[in-house]
Amino acid sequence: MKTFLSLIGILVLAVMALGTAGCAHYNRLVVLRQATDRSWADVQNVYQRRADLIPNLVRTVEGAANFEKSTLTSVIQARQQVNRVQLDPNTAPDNPEALKRFQQTQDQLSGAISRLLVVAERYPELRATANFQDLQTQLEGTENRIAVERRKFNEAVQEYNTAIQTVPAVFYAKFLGFQPKPYFTAQEGAEKPPEVNFNSAVPASSPALPTSSLTPALPAGSSPH
């Protein structure tokens, strides 16, 4: 009888130890998932900051005489597309395709802004304005911050994905709702530096930009997310 009770005691202690270890592993997964969500929110914040700068950029640039309409229109259209692809700003996405669509629209906007700033170099009167200089500095700083936050997000996702795919979490993570998270990928062509030519001549006869055709594209207070 004494031996039987000892075995029962050992079994109870083993179950308690396993339960404690299981709780510790589960709690770690929760912490890592929260870290990916927090990092995702930081990504969304910097993208929102950039989106909030664009209406002022449009108003500033369209005031320059004979500014290239197609370049400005591409920025407006890219921002409109960003507005159509919305993801939950508080929860890191589980769907790789949803993140891919989100990244594509944001990268297209980055490209459109970059081309606009290059074209603006051909307009000395525009570059001389304090408002444009301030916007240019803010946009360039925001683009750098976007790259930093995307890298941090990928690092958080890597740690989380590794945790749910290793023993013992791999046996229960999916059952408890811990799904793998997708990564941001390198922008296509990012390995090639852009060709910039600041010696191009200012277009002589480009039509003036009609304000009425641009303003409706950027409703005040709109948000891409």
Image (cartoon, rainbow, N blue to C red):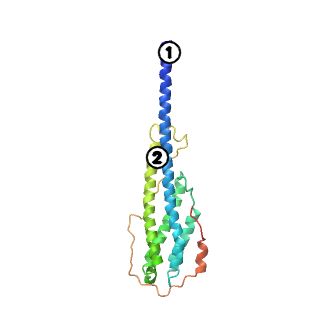
- Which one is earlier in the sequence, the residue at label 2 or at label 1? 1
Q: Residue at x 45, y 69 (%)?
A: 138
Q: Nearer the viewer, residue 31 or 156?
A: 31
Q: CA distance from mark 2 to mark 1?
A: 43 Å
Q: Nearer the viewer, residue 42 or 83?
A: 42
Identify the image quadrant of the C terminus.
bottom right
Q: Which residue is mark 1?
A: 4
Image coordinates for residue 224, horizontal then vertical, percent: 56, 64
Q: Could you tell me which secondary element the residue under label 2 belongs to? A: helix
> Which amino acid type is shown beneath numbered disc 2?
Asn
Please report contact status of discs 2 and 1: CB closer than 8 Å, yes or no: no
Name above or below for residue 162 compared with residue 14: below
Q: Residue at x 48, y 64 (%)?
A: 107
Q: Quadrant of residue 130?
A: bottom left
Image coordinates for residue 92, horizontal then vertical, percent: 52, 52
Q: Could you tell me which secondary element the residue under label 1 belongs to? A: helix
Name above or below for residue 174 compared with residue 123: above
> Which amino acid type is shown beneath numbered disc 1?
Phe
Image coordinates for residue 205, horizontal then vertical, percent: 49, 87
Image coordinates for residue 119, horizontal then vertical, percent: 45, 78
Q: Residue at x 47, y 14 (%)?
A: 3
- Asked whether residue 193 appears in the rendered view, the answer is yes
Q: Residue at x 49, y 51 (%)?
A: 36
Q: Which residue is mark 2?
A: 161
Residue at the far front in the pictured view: 130
- Asked whether residue 188 appears in the rendered view, the answer is no
Residue at the far top in the pictured view: 1
